[in-house]
Amino acid sequence: MKSLQVLKDVFGYTTFRAGQEKVINLVLKGENVLAVMPTGAGKSLCYQIPALINPGLTLVVSPLISLMKDQIDSLKQNGINAAALNSATPQEEVNPILRQAYEGKIKLLYVTPERLAMNYFRYQLNFLNVSLVAVDEAHCISQWGHDFRPAYRQIMDGVKSIKSNPNILALTATATPSVQKDIADQLQIPSANYVITSFARPNLSFKVVDNPKNTNLYLLDYIKQHPHESGIIYASTRKHVEELTDYLAQNGILTASYHAGLSNKERADVQDAFQFDKVQVIVATNAFGMGIDKRNVRFVIHANSTPNLESYYQEAGRAGRDGEACEGILIYHPKDIRLYRWFIEQSDLDDEYQKIQYQKLAMITKYVNTTECLQQFIVSYFGQSCDPCGKCSNCLGTFIEKDITSESKSIISTIYELDGRFGKTVVADVVSGANNQRMREIDAAHLKHYGSLKLGKTKILDLINYLISHNYLQLTDSQYPLVHVTNLGWDVLDNKKRVTQKISKKRERLIQTSS
Ligand code: ADP
Ligand code: ZN
């Protein structure tokens, strides 16, 4: 009752959204809680309302300074006094802020995880009556998440050092079941206190565009066909962002760039221009999005793939916060995946973490190759199920079912013959009977299955990818992944299983023209 009153009186909303009330009630009971709710679902209120009801202070651990600033500004608009302590806080302001918190004049204090890890700050916290610690973007705590932050690992130590014995609310938009468990284990959240709302976004239609000949033209056409709609185009580098912006601007589109290379002022101007529909399309790196609350974004197009499905879903999810129909389009270029693979290999991540990154990359590759409903694919990745959406590019695609058992057998036998010692390219070269240096080195011409498929190399690679995404073959987690045969693959060789492929008519056309 009390929380509903606060919702109305302070925030001016009439009803709770899915999950909010349950989270708030558990938090107010003093439980440790994990809330997994999609972007835009209203996670902030889940700790802001308890913060106003609880007697003491709510400490909010948040990873980004810009995010804190947005939150504090909007709290102040609602007449709530909140403050942040982070590396950007001038030294002379720290003590006054702590003093106000001590006097109860500040109800919410935002800190970075790094701040909470500092001994001196932990000491200072002991003078405050902390009722609740809210951990925003809680997936950062897990190596299995897509955005691991080592300082998050120390949050529990920090919380334990607080004498007033606060409870914890962990919040995230994207957590697979293993990430959920990792968060809960580390922050001591019992599984009865998971509040996980549906991952499905019924108003969002997903589409995969497979390696178009001219991505710029595709984007321009799309925008011209949606002249009165706001959209975001994500590209992976600043350079690509700027080139795309120029191209679209030259073709009459009202557009602006957004990336980390712009000054704060420039970024704020671009955000405003987008918010108030002065530009139709923002072309941005992944720096754009956090804390942006434009409700009528009608399309989010990724001109480059993301390195994992979590980021993809989070970014695409910025479309249609108003609940109206919208589109999330992923333009797939195999070279993007190769580039990410290279990044992972070049990084000095430890082996285990590197392996996780490779697995995440494999998952996004599966996403672009699947013939399942795309919404279902994503939702099941996050551990839930839903009905086919009926409107993604796979649900709408017209497919023909093709028996590809004999082609598959050639490929699988080749891998068997090669002892699983090679990657996709070598396998494709052998199967297609290529005549190059590498083939001579391995004396491929003497192999039984050399040249056993009279298809172009691209088509054979497509087939190999298909067999991987359908679990007949498997890649090892390494920079140059080797192809292995799975048990399902052996069943094909043993004539226990036939392989069929649903091919969209459009996709088949694409494959034919590209080989
Ligand atoms: P999240 O952190 O889950 O991405 P936010 O907390 O930023 O989402 O909330 C998204 C928007 O929804 C904000 O503008 C917020 O004020 C609004 N909102 C939150 N809860 C409600 C509600 N119960 N009714 C109406 N609007 C709400
Ligand atoms: Zn679908």
Image (cartoon, helix red, strand yellow):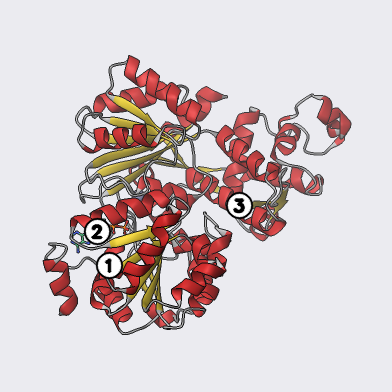
Q: Residue at x 50, y 66 (%)?
A: 116
> Can you tell which quarter of the image residue 22 is in?
bottom left
Is 417 placed above or below 432 here? below
Per the image, label 3 sits on a secondary structure element best described as helix
Mark 3 is on which residue type?
A: Gln
Q: Which residue is mark 1?
A: 48
Mark 3 vs 1, N-terminal side: 1
Per the image, label 2 sits on a secondary structure element best described as helix
Q: Which residue is mark 2?
A: 75
Which residue ends up furthest to the top in the rendered image? 250
In three-dimensional space, the C-alpha distance between marks 2 and 1, rounded to whole angstroms, equals 9 Å
Q: Which residue is mark 3?
A: 357
**Residue 80, position in %: x, y?**
22, 63
**Is the C-beta separation of discs 2 and 1 under 8 Å?**
yes
Q: Residue at x 40, y 82 (%)?
A: 192
Q: Is residue 262 left or right of residue 404?
A: left
Q: Is residue 317 left or right of residue 448?
A: left
Which residue ends up furthest to the front in the rendered image? 92
Q: Give the mark toward the camera: 3 or 1.
A: 1
Mark 2 vs 1, N-terminal side: 1
**Which image quadrant shows ligand 1?**
bottom left
Q: Residues within 10 Å of mark 1 (few under 14, many from 20)?
A: many
**Residue 423, position in %: x, y?**
73, 42
**Residue 277, position in %: x, y?**
20, 33
Q: Residue at x 70, y 52 (%)?
A: 476
Mark 2 is on which residue type?
A: Leu
Q: Which of 192 and 286 lies nearest the eye of the viewer? A: 286
Cβ of mark 3 under 8 Å from ligand 1: the answer is: no
Q: Residue at x 48, y 69 (%)?
A: 180
> Can you tell which quarter of the image residue 49 is in?
bottom left
Number of labels in the image equals: 3
